[in-house]
Amino acid sequence: MDRKGFLKNTMIATGSLLLGGAGIYRLLNDKGPADNPLPRTIEKIHHGNMKKVLVIMSAGTKLGNTDRLTDAYIKGLVERGHSVTKVYLGSMRIEGCRGCGVCQRLAHQCAVKDGMHDIYPLFAECDTVVMASPLYFWTITSQLKAFIERLYAISADDKYPQKDSVLLMTAGDDNESTFEQPKRYFRFLNQALGWNEVGVYCAGGCTGCEKLVRQIDKEHLENAYKMGLEL
């Protein structure tokens, strides 16, 4: 018996004590690291008859402040009748652009094989892209920046598919200049890509990972919900 088989059999024998049935199932069915380095998390939340909205949630923590703000916005979208797909970038392996240029020579196919290839078709069919991010070092997360960089693969002559766009952000600070840099970048991005900015909501004053409990003001959640209703 090989080492992996021995490990599985051992875990089955002791699973009721250590893992339980669900844990055993994951052990037996999970692919190896080479096939599935990180779980890919894409949720088809609602199928409506209006716009197709792709929500890119880039925080590494599910059910944290950014995720809760995003879900409040999604609640409004769903009630409005839009189709919504939510992507958790923090649960995916997505590299930044390598600048290799292969995509521009070979039918706009990115040479980097990772989770971004699951997102490209979703992006192609959506009308609106919602980018949600906590404030990290005065800007968006590196995961969200990598997503944006990798859109270069689908560009043709520096032109991109036209989209409506929304930015949702959270931060611990709540000063006048707290969100200045990411909002400036977002507006420049819309201009450069030819997108139409339809909404920005920045929620300051949140309690982050430094505290025992992450907290976001309910007023922010209500405002995000109402903004979703207005799309």
Image (cartoon, grey):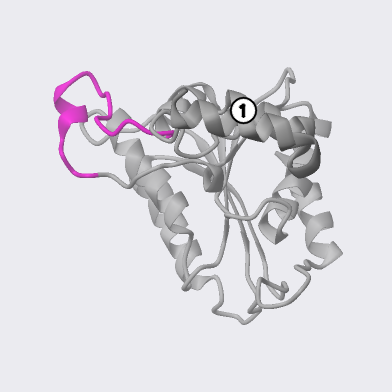
Of residues 225 and 137, the one nearer the viewer is 137
Give the quadrant of the C terminus: top right
92 vs 77, nearest the viewer: 92
Question: Image quadrant of residue 133?
Answer: bottom right
Q: What stretch is highlighted in magenta?
A: 98-115
Does residue 80 appear left or right of residue 107 in this picture? right
Q: Identify residue type, mark 1.
A: Asn
Does residue 139 lie above or below 96 as drawn? below
| Residue occupied by mark 1 | 9
Q: Nearer the viewer, residue 113 or 133?
A: 113
- Determine which quarter of the picture holds residue 26: top right
**Neighbours of disc 1 within 10 Å: few (<14), some (14-19), many (20+):** some
* Direction front: furthest residue: 1
Front-lying residue, 183 or 122: 122
Q: In this view, does 139 lie to the left or right of 214?
A: left
How many numbered marks have been drawn onto this rendered protein structure? 1
| Residue 180 position within the rendered picture, expressed as x and y whole percent measured from the top left | 50, 72
> Which residue sits at x=43%, y=42%?
93
Q: Is residue 107 magenta?
A: yes
Q: Position of residue 214 (x, y in %)?
A: 75, 68
Q: Is residue 174 above or below residue 164?
A: below
The residue depicted at 22 percent of the width and 18 percent of the height is: 107
Q: In this view, does 22 lie above or below 90?
A: above
In this image, 98 relative to 60: left or right?
Answer: left
The dominant secondary structure in magenta is: loop
Position of 19 relative to 83 (above/below): below
Question: Can you tell which quarter of the image residue 17 is in?
Answer: top right
SS at badge 1: helix
User: Where in the figure is residue 14, as x and y percent of width and height?
Assistant: 73, 37
* Residue 126 visible in rendering: yes
| x then y, percent, for residue 192 | 34, 47
